Image (cartoon, helix red, strand yellow):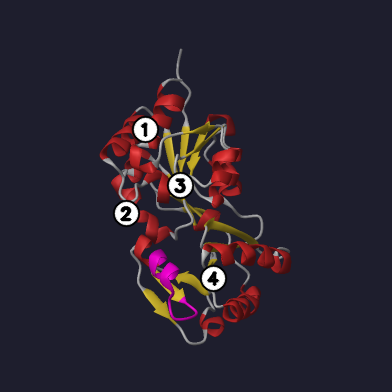
Amino acid sequence: MERKEKVLVLDIDGTLTDSNKEITLSTKEAILDIMREGHKVILASGRPTPGMRRYEQELELEKYGGYLISYNGGRIVDCRSGEILYQRTLPLTVLPDLYSFANRNGCGLVTYLGSTVISAFEPDEYIKLEARINGLPIKPVEHFVDFVDFEIHKCLMTADAGRAAVFEKELQEKYGQWVGVYRSEPFFIEIMPPNVNKATSLERLLEAIGQRQENTVCCGDGFNDICMIKYGRVGVAMGNAQPEVKAAADYITATNDEDGLVQAIDEFIRKE
């Protein structure tokens, strides 16, 4: 009997990559093997598109016809053609309020211009981490609200984990009517266009490429992966995932440092 083409949807940090932000050889070989067999691979990340390119190239997604869902769902790119299949932008009218909130509470605040991280304040340790992870330079600007007069896909607010959890709820209560607010990491608060996340954009992509939800295996470790883990036919949480992510998953695999993706691929793509 002919096997169904599966769609493997992968978060990057803490899922596709190990603690050193590298794809292990075993994980890379397993992903390449299933693409050679005709299965599809989609990378779905909170990263800006330029911060995903390294892994797109390493996995040869242009050759095998993969896709990128970047900015937590704010943009979808066809790796083979380079075409932007979908994008949503954040209403700039919310920027003054976001800036005031961040300034008042001592939070970091950034957005992205091409391959540059635009910072409203002197970068804190979390913003420096964001820039380092993505391999992008930081440009602090004095008048953030005036400077950002271009389309943006998201803002990122930063604070230590305890304060970020409180701020996430406050932002949802104050601005949830106009934007989506959720954490991707304990210290990262994502500010998105309304009704945009990894799951809604994945659904849109599947429709565009003639694929079905029942063929998806969605893997992640962070708070922003919960929606797509719940959406997927099989939702996989990494062994290093946040407890809330594990609670939402159908299956908990090994950690990202133990080739957990290989285990998930063996269980839900190679066996079936």
Q: Secondary structure at mark 1?
A: helix
Distance CA(mark 1)–CA(mark 3): 14 Å
The residue tagged 1 is 262
Residue 198 location (% of width, % of height): 55, 49
Rendered image: mark on residue 151: 4
Q: Residue furthest left?
A: 25
Residue 211 location (% of width, % of height): 54, 34
Indicate the amino acid at tag 3: Asp
Q: Is residue 96 visible?
A: yes
Q: Toward which corner of the image does residue 250 lie, by quadrant?
A: top right
Q: Toward which corner of the image does residue 180 lie, by quadrant?
A: bottom right
Indicate the amino acid at tag 4: Glu
Q: Toward which corner of the image does residue 53 lie, by quadrant?
A: bottom left
Q: Secondary structure at mark 4?
A: loop
Disc 1 versus disc 4: nearer the observer: 1
In front here: 117 or 167?
167
Q: Would you call the spot at circle 3 few (<14 residues within 10 Å), some (14-19), or many (20 or more)?
A: many
Rendered image: mark on residue 54: 2
The residue tagged 3 is 11
The disc, 2 or 1, on the residue closer to the chain's N-terminal end is: 2
Stretch of the chain drawn in magenta? 119-130
Q: Would you call the spot at circle 2 few (<14 residues within 10 Å), some (14-19), or many (20 or more)?
A: few
Q: Secondary structure at mark 3?
A: loop
The disc, 2 or 4, on the residue closer to the chain's N-terminal end is: 2
